[in-house]
């Protein structure tokens, strides 16, 4: 009897793709992903499939391994085991910059902006890899430089308009209120033209009206750019309202995966994370 060799020697779980993505190949697949720090299995047996235009959520208590997963996806850390497929391609050999060019952009749990650059510059520096004038054309300010500068400026203003932030284009990023800095980080990530946007606690420190607005904006970003979003968030109202698929992480392992309804009714999740239900 002949046996077929499989490229990925792991049975994949059925994907939780939203209906709209069911006929398309997923943007991201993690298969048996894991990393160990010293003796600690920070992430273990992490399997997830994300649809091409899905908003997916990653939730779990502090220290569960959520940010570590973002660091694995962006190659800040090399996995101890497992496979990551981005658009069906194994990203094993890519570094952080190459991953970004391949389509994954992220924001950080702690804001990382160029505080002393303007709001617009924070966005345009992220677009740098897409500019085509050479250094001489730039130094001599030849026509192609101006054309591209104009295109870059217009694109930055277009991105700023998503959050109605055009009027702050010239302000120093560090002078913006906290919520606006978080929004700018999202725009800077979008400026790299991702197919998958990773948001690490985007609503942290935002007031309820900012959070509500952010929720609408994440949805409209997905609809406008037709991209996938994976977000880590503690605000359950936000998560349950905008995520189509949710994975719950506890001590580095997925303890539940499913729709918001599945998650909210899963006894293990209620016990481990959402807090035991009070008797009525
Ligand atoms: N570079 C590292 N070295 C050692 N331990 C780490 C490192 N990064 C994360 N960890 C540990 O991995 C676990 C998961 O951390 P993290 O992914 O930041 O959790 P979360 O984002 O869910 O709060 C924690 O116990 C943390 O201390
Ligand atoms: Mg974290």
Image (spheres, rainbow, N blue to C red):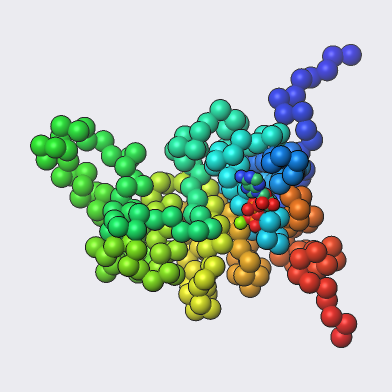
Q: Is residue 55 something one can see in this rendering?
A: no
Image quarter (top left, top right, bottom left or bottom right) of the N terminus: top right
Residue at x-position 77% and y-position 28%: 9
Task: Find residue 142 and report its horizontal and vertical position in percent.
Answer: 11, 38
- Decide if residue 12 is on the left or right side of residue 231: right
Residue 187, position in %: x, y? 40, 57
Image: 101 above or below 202:
above
User: Looking at the image, can residue 236 be seen?
Assistant: yes
Could you say which is closer to the camera, residue 52 or residue 162?
162
Q: Specify the quadrant of the image occupied by residue 274.
A: bottom right
Q: In this view, does 88 lie above or below 105?
A: above
The residue positioned farthest toward the bottom in the image shown: 280
Residue 103: % across, % down: 49, 42
Side (left or right) of 247 relative to 140? right
Residue 129 in which image quadrant = top left
Relative vertical location of residue 160 with respect to residue 251 in this rendering, above or below? below
Q: Which of 23 and 28 is in front in this view?
A: 28
Q: Where is residue 55 in the image (x, y as percent from the top left)?
A: 59, 57
Q: Residue at x 38, y 50 (%)?
A: 191
Name the residue located 59 percent from the left edge and 48 percent from the top edge. 70
The answer to whether 73 appears left or right of 7 in the picture is left
Q: In which quarter of the image is the C terminus?
A: bottom right
Residue at the extreme front of the image, as rendered: 38
Q: In this view, does 60 lie to the left or right of 141?
A: right
Task: Work out whether residue 23 or residue 251 is closer to the camera in this orientation and state it.
Answer: 251
Q: Locate residue 37: give its quadrant.
A: top right
């Amino acid at each position: 009897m002949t046996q077929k060799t499989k490229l990925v020697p792991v049975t994949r779980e059925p994907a939780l793709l939203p209906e709209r993505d069911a006929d398309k190949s997923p943007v991201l697949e993690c298969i048996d992903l894991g990393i160990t720090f010293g003796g600690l299995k920070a992430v273990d047996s992490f399997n997830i499939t994300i649809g091409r235009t899905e908003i997916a959520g990653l939730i779990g208590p502090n220290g569960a391994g959520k940010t570590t997963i973002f660091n694995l996806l962006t190659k800040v850390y090399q996995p101890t085991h497992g496979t990551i497929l981005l658009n069906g391609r194994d990203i094993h050999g890519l570094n952080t910059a190459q991953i970004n060019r391949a389509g994954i952009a992220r924001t950080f749990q702690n804001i990382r902006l160029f505080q002393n650059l303007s709001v617009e510059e924070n966005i345009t520096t992220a677009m740098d890899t897409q500019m085509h004038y050479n250094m001489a054309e730039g130094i001599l300010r030849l026509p192609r430089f101006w054309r591209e500068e104009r295109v870059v400026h217009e694109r930055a203003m277009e991105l700023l308009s998503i959050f109605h932030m055009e009027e702050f284009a010239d302000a120093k990023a560090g002078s913006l209120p906290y919520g606006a800095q978080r929004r700018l980080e999202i725009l800077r990530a979008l400026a790299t033209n991702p197919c998958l946007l990773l948001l690490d606690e985007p609503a942290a420190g935002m007031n309820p009206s900012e959070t509500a607005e952010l929720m609408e904006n994440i949805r409209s970003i997905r609809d406008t750019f037709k991209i996938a979003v994976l977000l880590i968030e503690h605000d359950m109202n936000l998560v349950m309202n905008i995520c189509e698929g949710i994975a719950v992480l506890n001590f580095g392992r997925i303890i539940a995966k499913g729709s918001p309804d599945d998650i909210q009714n899963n006894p293990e999740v209620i016990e481990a994370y959402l807090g035991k239900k009070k008797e009525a």
